[in-house]
Amino acid sequence: MFTGIVQTQLPLIELDHKSDFASFIFEFPAAMAENLQIGASVAINGTCLTVRTLDVKAEFTRVSFDAIGQTLKVTNLGTLAVGSMVNIERAAKFGDEIGGHPLSGHIMDQVAVLAVNESANNLVVWMQRPEHLAPYLLDKGYVALNGASLTIAEVEADRFSVHLIPETRDVTTFGAVKVGDAINVEVDAQTQAVVETVRRLLATPELLTALAPNNK
Protein backbone atom coordinates (compact mmCIF):
# COMPACT_ATOMS: atom_id res chain seq x y z
CA MET A 1 0.00 0.00 0.00
CA PHE A 2 1.06 3.58 -0.67
CA THR A 3 -0.17 6.95 0.57
CA GLY A 4 0.38 9.20 -2.43
CA ILE A 5 2.92 11.31 -0.55
CA VAL A 6 5.79 11.34 -3.04
CA GLN A 7 9.13 11.22 -1.24
CA THR A 8 11.41 12.36 -4.03
CA GLN A 9 11.92 12.49 -7.78
CA LEU A 10 14.81 10.65 -9.40
CA PRO A 11 16.22 10.31 -12.91
CA LEU A 12 16.24 7.01 -14.73
CA ILE A 13 19.90 5.92 -14.85
CA GLU A 14 19.71 2.84 -17.07
CA LEU A 15 17.03 1.33 -19.30
CA ASP A 16 16.87 -2.06 -20.98
CA HIS A 17 13.79 -1.99 -23.20
CA LYS A 18 12.86 -5.20 -24.99
CA SER A 19 9.71 -6.45 -26.68
CA ASP A 20 6.92 -6.34 -24.05
CA PHE A 21 9.44 -5.96 -21.23
CA ALA A 22 11.66 -3.31 -19.67
CA SER A 23 14.17 -3.06 -16.83
CA PHE A 24 14.74 0.25 -15.05
CA ILE A 25 17.64 1.26 -12.78
CA PHE A 26 17.60 4.21 -10.38
CA GLU A 27 20.12 5.44 -7.83
CA PHE A 28 18.38 5.79 -4.47
CA PRO A 29 20.04 8.09 -1.91
CA ALA A 30 21.38 6.09 1.04
CA ALA A 31 18.68 7.35 3.41
CA MET A 32 15.90 6.39 1.03
CA ALA A 33 17.35 2.92 0.43
CA GLU A 34 17.61 2.15 4.15
CA ASN A 35 16.19 -1.33 4.88
CA LEU A 36 15.09 -1.71 1.26
CA GLN A 37 15.07 -5.37 0.27
CA ILE A 38 14.77 -7.41 -2.90
CA GLY A 39 11.08 -8.10 -3.46
CA ALA A 40 9.93 -4.87 -1.81
CA SER A 41 7.28 -2.70 -3.47
CA VAL A 42 8.08 0.82 -4.65
CA ALA A 43 5.78 3.20 -6.53
CA ILE A 44 7.37 4.64 -9.68
CA ASN A 45 5.11 7.40 -11.05
CA GLY A 46 2.43 5.75 -8.96
CA THR A 47 3.01 2.30 -10.49
CA CYS A 48 3.73 -0.45 -8.00
CA LEU A 49 6.93 -2.23 -9.05
CA THR A 50 9.01 -4.89 -7.30
CA VAL A 51 12.69 -4.45 -6.44
CA ARG A 52 14.66 -6.98 -8.45
CA THR A 53 18.29 -6.16 -7.58
CA LEU A 54 20.18 -3.95 -5.13
CA ASP A 55 23.75 -2.72 -5.62
CA VAL A 56 24.77 -0.86 -2.48
CA LYS A 57 27.36 1.94 -2.81
CA ALA A 58 28.68 4.37 -0.21
CA GLU A 59 26.36 7.28 -1.04
CA PHE A 60 23.58 5.57 -2.97
CA THR A 61 22.07 2.22 -3.89
CA ARG A 62 21.40 1.19 -7.48
CA VAL A 63 17.93 -0.34 -7.54
CA SER A 64 16.44 -2.20 -10.50
CA PHE A 65 12.82 -2.93 -11.39
CA ASP A 66 11.16 -4.91 -14.17
CA ALA A 67 7.92 -4.09 -15.98
CA ILE A 68 5.97 -6.36 -18.32
CA GLY A 69 4.19 -5.34 -21.51
CA GLN A 70 0.79 -4.66 -19.92
CA THR A 71 2.36 -2.27 -17.40
CA LEU A 72 4.25 -0.48 -20.15
CA LYS A 73 1.05 -0.15 -22.18
CA VAL A 74 -1.25 1.14 -19.42
CA THR A 75 1.22 3.47 -17.68
CA ASN A 76 3.66 6.15 -18.82
CA LEU A 77 6.62 3.95 -17.84
CA GLY A 78 6.65 2.71 -21.42
CA THR A 79 7.75 6.15 -22.63
CA LEU A 80 10.59 6.66 -20.15
CA ALA A 81 14.10 7.31 -21.46
CA VAL A 82 17.43 7.58 -19.66
CA GLY A 83 17.34 10.86 -17.76
CA SER A 84 13.54 10.92 -17.39
CA MET A 85 12.45 12.11 -13.95
CA VAL A 86 9.94 10.01 -12.01
CA ASN A 87 8.11 10.26 -8.70
CA ILE A 88 9.24 7.76 -6.05
CA GLU A 89 7.40 6.48 -2.96
CA ARG A 90 8.43 3.58 -0.74
CA ALA A 91 5.62 1.32 0.46
CA ALA A 92 3.83 2.45 3.62
CA LYS A 93 4.62 0.77 6.93
CA PHE A 94 2.32 0.19 9.88
CA GLY A 95 2.51 3.25 12.11
CA ASP A 96 3.33 5.64 9.27
CA GLU A 97 1.43 8.90 9.10
CA ILE A 98 -1.08 8.69 6.23
CA GLY A 99 -0.94 12.20 4.82
CA GLY A 100 -2.54 11.39 1.48
CA HIS A 101 -5.01 8.57 0.83
CA PRO A 102 -4.60 4.78 0.51
CA LEU A 103 -3.30 3.68 -2.90
CA SER A 104 -2.65 0.28 -4.44
CA GLY A 105 -0.20 1.39 -7.12
CA HIS A 106 -2.43 -0.13 -9.82
CA ILE A 107 -2.74 2.45 -12.58
CA MET A 108 -6.07 2.55 -14.43
CA ASP A 109 -5.04 4.69 -17.41
CA GLN A 110 -3.16 7.77 -18.56
CA VAL A 111 -4.63 11.21 -19.18
CA ALA A 112 -3.13 14.07 -21.18
CA VAL A 113 -2.32 17.47 -19.72
CA LEU A 114 -4.47 20.04 -21.53
CA ALA A 115 -3.38 23.30 -19.90
CA VAL A 116 -0.89 24.58 -17.32
CA ASN A 117 -1.61 27.92 -15.62
CA GLU A 118 1.22 29.09 -13.37
CA SER A 119 1.44 31.90 -10.84
CA ALA A 120 3.92 32.75 -8.09
CA ASN A 121 2.37 30.45 -5.49
CA ASN A 122 0.03 28.22 -7.43
CA LEU A 123 0.06 25.88 -10.40
CA VAL A 124 -3.24 24.86 -11.96
CA VAL A 125 -3.10 21.82 -14.23
CA TRP A 126 -6.05 20.80 -16.40
CA MET A 127 -6.24 17.19 -17.60
CA GLN A 128 -8.51 15.02 -19.67
CA ARG A 129 -11.53 13.50 -17.96
CA PRO A 130 -12.14 10.47 -20.17
CA GLU A 131 -15.62 8.98 -20.22
CA HIS A 132 -14.65 5.67 -18.59
CA LEU A 133 -13.02 7.45 -15.62
CA ALA A 134 -15.43 10.39 -15.34
CA PRO A 135 -17.70 8.76 -12.69
CA TYR A 136 -14.72 8.52 -10.32
CA LEU A 137 -13.22 11.97 -10.98
CA LEU A 138 -15.48 14.15 -8.87
CA ASP A 139 -15.32 17.69 -7.55
CA LYS A 140 -13.21 17.76 -4.34
CA GLY A 141 -12.57 14.04 -4.64
CA TYR A 142 -9.20 12.30 -4.30
CA VAL A 143 -7.10 11.17 -7.23
CA ALA A 144 -3.52 9.94 -7.59
CA LEU A 145 -1.62 11.50 -10.49
CA ASN A 146 1.82 10.03 -11.21
CA GLY A 147 1.60 8.68 -7.68
CA ALA A 148 0.85 12.01 -5.99
CA SER A 149 -2.29 12.15 -3.85
CA LEU A 150 -4.21 15.26 -4.94
CA THR A 151 -7.63 16.82 -4.49
CA ILE A 152 -9.62 17.60 -7.60
CA ALA A 153 -10.30 21.35 -7.66
CA GLU A 154 -12.69 21.75 -10.57
CA VAL A 155 -14.60 19.39 -12.84
CA GLU A 156 -16.01 19.98 -16.29
CA ALA A 157 -17.59 17.53 -18.71
CA ASP A 158 -14.36 16.42 -20.36
CA ARG A 159 -11.63 17.80 -18.12
CA PHE A 160 -10.64 18.35 -14.49
CA SER A 161 -8.05 20.40 -12.66
CA VAL A 162 -5.75 20.19 -9.66
CA HIS A 163 -4.00 23.05 -7.85
CA LEU A 164 -0.40 22.39 -6.84
CA ILE A 165 1.28 24.17 -3.93
CA PRO A 166 5.03 24.98 -4.07
CA GLU A 167 5.93 21.95 -1.93
CA THR A 168 4.28 19.58 -4.39
CA ARG A 169 5.97 21.31 -7.29
CA ASP A 170 9.38 21.04 -5.59
CA VAL A 171 9.17 17.39 -4.51
CA THR A 172 7.39 15.89 -7.51
CA THR A 173 7.78 15.99 -11.27
CA PHE A 174 4.79 18.33 -11.49
CA GLY A 175 7.21 21.23 -11.19
CA ALA A 176 8.13 20.59 -14.82
CA VAL A 177 4.72 19.49 -16.13
CA LYS A 178 3.76 20.67 -19.62
CA VAL A 179 0.88 20.44 -22.05
CA GLY A 180 0.76 17.05 -23.75
CA ASP A 181 2.35 15.09 -20.90
CA ALA A 182 0.76 11.70 -20.20
CA ILE A 183 -0.10 11.32 -16.52
CA ASN A 184 -0.74 8.03 -14.71
CA VAL A 185 -4.13 7.92 -12.95
CA GLU A 186 -5.32 5.83 -10.01
CA VAL A 187 -8.80 6.77 -8.84
CA ASP A 188 -9.80 6.69 -5.18
CA ALA A 189 -10.81 3.13 -4.28
CA GLN A 190 -13.62 4.20 -1.95
CA THR A 191 -15.13 6.45 -4.60
CA GLN A 192 -14.91 3.64 -7.12
CA ALA A 193 -16.60 1.19 -4.73
CA VAL A 194 -19.50 3.57 -4.01
CA VAL A 195 -20.02 4.38 -7.68
CA GLU A 196 -19.98 0.73 -8.74
CA THR A 197 -22.37 -0.24 -5.92
CA VAL A 198 -24.86 2.43 -6.96
CA ARG A 199 -24.54 1.36 -10.59
CA ARG A 200 -25.36 -2.25 -9.70
CA LEU A 201 -28.34 -1.19 -7.60
CA LEU A 202 -29.73 0.98 -10.38
CA ALA A 203 -29.27 -1.87 -12.84
CA THR A 204 -31.23 -4.25 -10.57
CA PRO A 205 -34.68 -2.71 -9.85
CA GLU A 206 -35.85 -5.73 -7.84
CA LEU A 207 -32.94 -5.26 -5.45
CA LEU A 208 -33.82 -1.59 -4.98
CA THR A 209 -37.39 -2.63 -4.22
CA ALA A 210 -36.23 -5.18 -1.67
CA LEU A 211 -34.10 -2.55 0.07
CA ALA A 212 -36.88 0.05 0.21
CA PRO A 213 -37.83 1.04 3.83
CA ASN A 214 -41.47 -0.08 3.47
CA ASN A 215 -40.32 -3.58 2.57
CA LYS A 216 -38.40 -4.14 5.81
Image (spheres, rainbow, N blue to C red):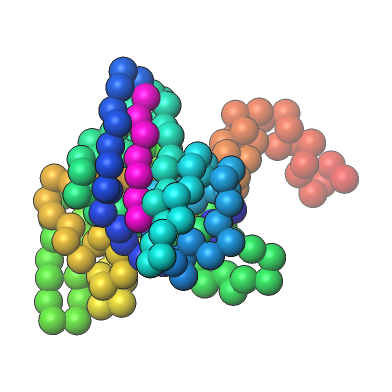
Q: In screen coordinates, is 154 left or right of 57?
A: left
Relative height, residue 23 to residue 29 (above, below): above
Hey, which residue is sitting farthest right in the picture?
216
- Is 63 part of what is drawn in magenta? no
The reply to whether residue 32 is visible in this rendering is yes
Give residue 36's position: percent from left, percent from top: 55, 56
Which quadrant of the figure has residue 71?
A: top left
Q: Position of residue 147 (x, y in %)?
A: 40, 54
Q: Residue at the location (35% across, 55% down)?
A: 27
Residue 132 appears in view: no
Q: Residue furthest front?
A: 58
**Viewer-side residue, 200 vs 82:** 82
Relative to 118, residue 89 above or below: above
Q: Which residues are magenta?
A: 21-27
Q: Is residue 23 magenta?
A: yes
Residue 18 lies, with reference to residue 60, above or below; the image says above
What residue is shown at x 43% (from left), y 34% (from top)?
66
From the viewer's side, name the closer residue of 166 and 51: 51
Residue appearing at x 12%, y 70% in the figure? 118
The overriding secondary structure of the stretch rendered in magenta is strand
Q: Position of residue 83 (x, y in %)?
A: 19, 49
Q: Is residue 12 above or below residue 208?
A: below
Q: Residue furthest top?
A: 19
Q: How many marks?
A: 0
Q: Position of residue 175 (x, y in %)?
A: 20, 66
**Which residue ends up furthest to the bottom in the rendered image?**
121
Q: Is residue 45 left or right of residue 92?
A: left
Q: Quadrant of residue 128?
A: top left
Q: Quadrant of residue 19?
A: top left
